Image (cartoon, rainbow, N blue to C red):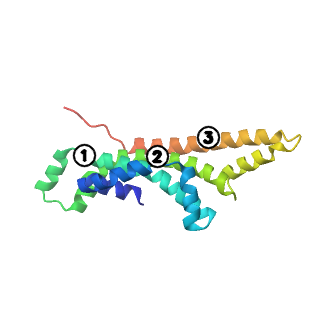
């Protein structure tokens, strides 16, 4: 809801790109572990802080890929829109959106992968419920004598995390493939 419209605006308007690209370049590489304490400070709760951390870490691929997609729309398409005197809404919905869709879906794919990584890490750090918390809890109980079952549980959890990530990746690749077209060159 935020990343794709922001990417469209940044890609469409050069002044926005010049204004926001340095900010994105500054914030994008910050570790999720650094964002979580800021979320805890601002939101005063583990769940909102985790959601904030997931949001701020996963938004960048959507913004960047959508903006790059908009910037790579052939100028001829936009010239035709200008000649036809199309409104900005028509340009976005009839020209930009179809042309940028593969870039957007790639951004969503990368964002979902990032979000899945951050979800597990945030659960480990904030406690509560979830597979990340379960892995951390199993690790904390590992020091109990004769508790080798915990290592097996940790390995099972890692396998489950990987399988869920694989299923999400596969589903998003299939979705992207369904909406990607090959440009015919003459």
Q: Where does the C terminus fall, quadrant-wise?
A: top left
Question: Residues under labels 2 and 1: Cα distance?
Answer: 27 Å
Q: Which of 90 and 143 lies nearest the eye of the viewer?
A: 143
Residue picked out by circle 3: 162
Callout 1–callout 3 Cβ contact below 8 Å? no
Where is residue 46? Give x, y as percent.
63, 62
Identify which residue is drawn at 27% across, 37% down: 183
Where is residue 51? Give x, y as percent.
55, 60
Question: Residues under labels 1 and 3: Cα distance?
Answer: 35 Å
* 169 to the left or right of 5: right
Mark 2 vs 1, N-terminal side: 2
Mark 2 Cα within 10 Å, few/some/many (few <14, many 20+)?
A: few
The extreme right residue here reads: 146
Residue picked out by circle 1: 73
Inspect this view and state whether residue 104 appears: no
Mark 1 vs 3, N-terminal side: 1
Residue picked out by circle 2: 29
Callout 2–callout 1 Cβ contact below 8 Å? no
Q: Which of 43 and 10 lies nearest the eye of the viewer?
A: 43
The extreme left residue here reads: 83
């Amino acid at each position: 809801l935020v990343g794709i419209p922001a990417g469209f605006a940044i890609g469409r308007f050069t002044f926005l790109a010049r204004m926001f690209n340095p900010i994105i370049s500054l914030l994008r590489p910050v570790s999720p572990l650094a964002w979580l304490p800021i979320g805890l400070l601002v939101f005063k709760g583990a769940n909102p802080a985790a959601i904030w951390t997931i949001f701020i870490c996963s938004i960048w691929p959507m913004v960047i890929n959508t903006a790059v997609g908009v910037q790579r729309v052939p100028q001829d398409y936009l010239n035709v829109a200008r000649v036809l005197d199309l409104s900005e809404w028509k340009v976005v919905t009839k020209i930009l959106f179809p042309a940028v869709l593969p870039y957007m879906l790639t951004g969503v794919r990368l964002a979902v992968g990032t979000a899945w990584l951050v979800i597990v890490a945030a659960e480990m750090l904030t406690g509560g419920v979830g597979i990340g918390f379960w892995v951390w809890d199993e690790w904390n109980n590992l020091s109990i004598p004769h508790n080798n079952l915990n290592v097996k549980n940790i390995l099972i959890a890692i396998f489950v995390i990987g399988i869920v990530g694989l299923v999400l990746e596969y589903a998003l690749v299939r979705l992207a493939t369904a909406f990607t077209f090959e440009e015919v060159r003459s």
